[in-house]
Image (cartoon, helix red, strand yellow):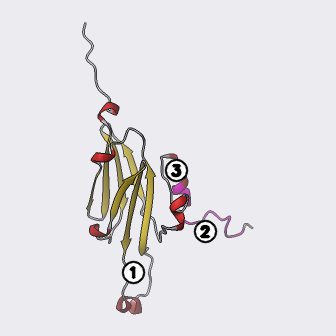
Amino acid sequence: MSSSRDDPLRRWPFDDMERVLRGFGSAGVGRDEESNVVTSHWMPPVDIREEAAGFVIEADVPGVDPAAIEVSMADGVLSIRGERPAPGDAERTTMRRAERARGTFYRRFSLPDTADAQRITARCTSGVLRVDIPKRAAATPRKIEVRG
């Protein structure tokens, strides 16, 4: 019988996701020089797509006030951080089950050189944060007409 730390059903659910996302350029949480300063109580799940004009990151952040989300870009790394507030004292005394993660979150993603950091935009609608990262004009594929 394996110990609980070796049991895949008992692992933190995002361990495997972080390994996959690292392959797509995720800088991860707690894996760099800032890990001593920045902590995360939970990590919103993300989808990352590459489109012809750029990249799109969508993160599920239900219950998070858009004003409490910070998106920043430095040294080729896009950082997303925010907070879902913990329940107040009155809510805690009546709580019978608490399954939703609360507190701060922090995600980092290394961007490719083709990303245009100056034109990144972000918006949050219906609990989904969408970050649009355009590609630089030189990196956008251009169709060339072939003449006969």
Q: Label 1, label 3: how many angstroms apart (C-alpha)?
A: 29 Å
In the displayed structure image, the side of residue 67 where residue 114 appears, left or right: right
The image position of residue 134, as x and y in percent, is 30, 43
Question: CA gap, disc 3 to disc 2?
Answer: 21 Å
Indicate which disc, 1 or 2, sits on the residue closer to the N terminus.
Answer: 2
Say what amino acid the circle numbered 3 marks: Arg
Q: Contact (CB < 8 A) between labels 1 and 2? A: no
Report the residue marked by disc 1.
Answer: 86
- Alpha-carbon neighbours of circle 1 within 10 Å: few (<14), some, or many (≥20)? few
Give the residue displayed 44% in from the left and 81% down from the top. 98
The circle on residue 103 is: none
Closer to the camera: disc 3 or disc 2?
3
Q: Quadrant of residue 116?
A: top left
Q: Residue at x 42, y 46 (%)?
A: 111
Residue 10, numbered label? 2
1 or 3: tag closer to the N-terminus: 3
Q: What secondary structure is found at the residue carrying circle 3?
A: helix
Tag 1: residue type? Ala
Q: Residues within 10 Å of mark 2 (few under 14, many from 20)?
A: few
Q: Which residue lies under the disc numbered 3?
A: 22
Judge the density around disc 3: few (<14), some (14-19), many (≥20) Cα neighbours within 10 Å. some
Magenta residues span 3-18
- SS of the residue under disc 1: loop
Name the secondary structure under disc 2: loop
Q: Name the residue: 32% across, 31% down.
A: 138
